[in-house]
Image (cartoon, helix red, strand yellow):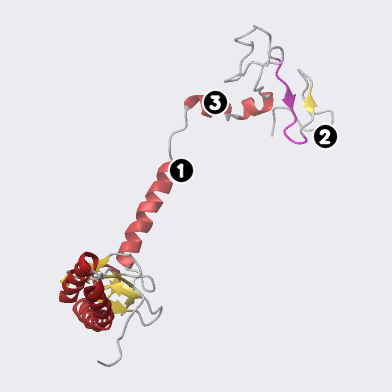
């Protein structure tokens, strides 16, 4: 037997009882498993092991000799089974000339481009995915804002300011209110200049710090 060609995308499931291999795609991980090929050598080895445990002595030494002979013969049979498995499943895989990955033809190979889909994605699939992503973005961007939140975002609300807790009892305030729902304390709201942020006194028309008109643009 000449050189045995092999790749990294396989698993050897062989045992003393027979041979079995799995070959899988480097890109998606799916693949194929060969059917289990029983080994007659495994049956002979089991018989020798049983005889050795029962009788020992001469039969025990015979089992040792059989094990050494079985090992070399089993390796040869294993090589034959491996080559057969590769020949059986190789048509289902192809190596990308750009990234050298072995990929499955059914899902990860772009026949039109002659490259794997990691190197040459399917444009139809990518377009569908991009459109779906954009649709989700549009849904979030145009989702209807709750009326209460919309009211809080009005310019008047920002100018008046709001408190998160009651200044008297520190109870949380879910919205802008005039009196605390827990202790009844009056919630003093403060106004600030939209230009410089300075605190504004009630009733003034211009900011005392920067001269900006209060309530105007």
User: Considering depth in this image, is 136 or 105 the residue closer to the camera?
Assistant: 105
Residue drawn at the location 35% of the way across and 68% of the way down = 27
Please count the marks in the image.
Answer: 3
Is residue 156 positioned above or below 101 on the image?
above
Q: Which residues are magenta?
A: 188-196
Between label 3 and label 2, give the one nearer the viewer.
3
Q: Which mark is residue 151?
A: 3
Is residue 210 positioned above or below 41 on the image?
above
Which image quarter is the C terminus in? top right
Q: Residues within 10 Å of mark 3 (few under 14, many from 20)?
A: few
Q: Earlier in the sequence, mark 3 or mark 2?
A: 3
Give the left or right position of residue 178, taking residue 148 as reference: right
User: Considering depth in this image, is 92 or 57 the residue closer to the camera?
Assistant: 57
Residue 33 seen in the figure:
no
Q: Residue furthest right?
A: 209
Residue 124: horizontal and vertical position, in percent?
30, 65
Q: Quadrant of residue 201?
A: top right
Give the left or right position of residue 193, taking residue 15 as reference: right
Residue drawn at the location 31% of the way across and 62% of the way down = 125
Q: Name the residue that disc number 1 marks.
A: 141
User: Considering depth in this image, is 119 or 59 the residue closer to the camera?
Assistant: 59
Q: Residue furthest bottom?
A: 2
Q: Which mark is residue 210?
A: 2
Residue 212: horizontal and vertical position, in percent?
78, 33
Q: CA distance from mark 3 to mark 2?
A: 28 Å
Label 3, secondary structure: give it: helix
Is residue 23 part of the magenta span, yes or no?
Answer: no
Q: Earlier in the sequence, mark 3 or mark 1?
A: 1
Is residue 194 part of the magenta span, yes or no?
Answer: yes
Name the magenta segment's main secondary structure: loop
Q: CA distance from mark 1 to mark 2?
A: 37 Å
């Amino acid at each position: 037997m000449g050189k045995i060609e092999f790749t990294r995308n396989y698993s050897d499931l062989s045992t003393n009882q027979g041979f079995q291999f799995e070959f899988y795609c480097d890109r998606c991980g799916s693949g194929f498993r060969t059917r289990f090929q029983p080994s007659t050598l495994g049956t002979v080895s089991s018989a020798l092991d049983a005889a050795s445990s029962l009788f020992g002595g001469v039969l025990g030494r015979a089992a040792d000799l059989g094990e050494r002979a079985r090992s070399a013969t089993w390796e040869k049979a294993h090589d034959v089974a491996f080559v057969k498995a590769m020949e059986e499943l190789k048509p289902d895989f192809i190596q990308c000339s750009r990234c050298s990955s072995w990929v499955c033809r059914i899902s990860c190979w772009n026949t039109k481009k002659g490259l794997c889909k990691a190197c040459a994605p399917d444009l139809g699939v990518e377009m569908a995915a991009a459109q779906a992503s954009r649709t989700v973005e549009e849904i979030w961007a145009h989702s209807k804002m709750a009326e209460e939140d919309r009211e809080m975002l009005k310019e008047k609300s920002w100018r008046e300011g709001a408190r998160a807790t009651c200044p008297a009892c520190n109870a949380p305030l879910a919205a802008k209110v005039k009196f605390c729902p827990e202790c009844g304390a009056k919630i003093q709201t403060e106004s600030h200049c939209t230009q410089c942020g300075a605190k504004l006194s009630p009733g003034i028309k211009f900011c005392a710090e920067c001269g900006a008109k209060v309530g105007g643009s």
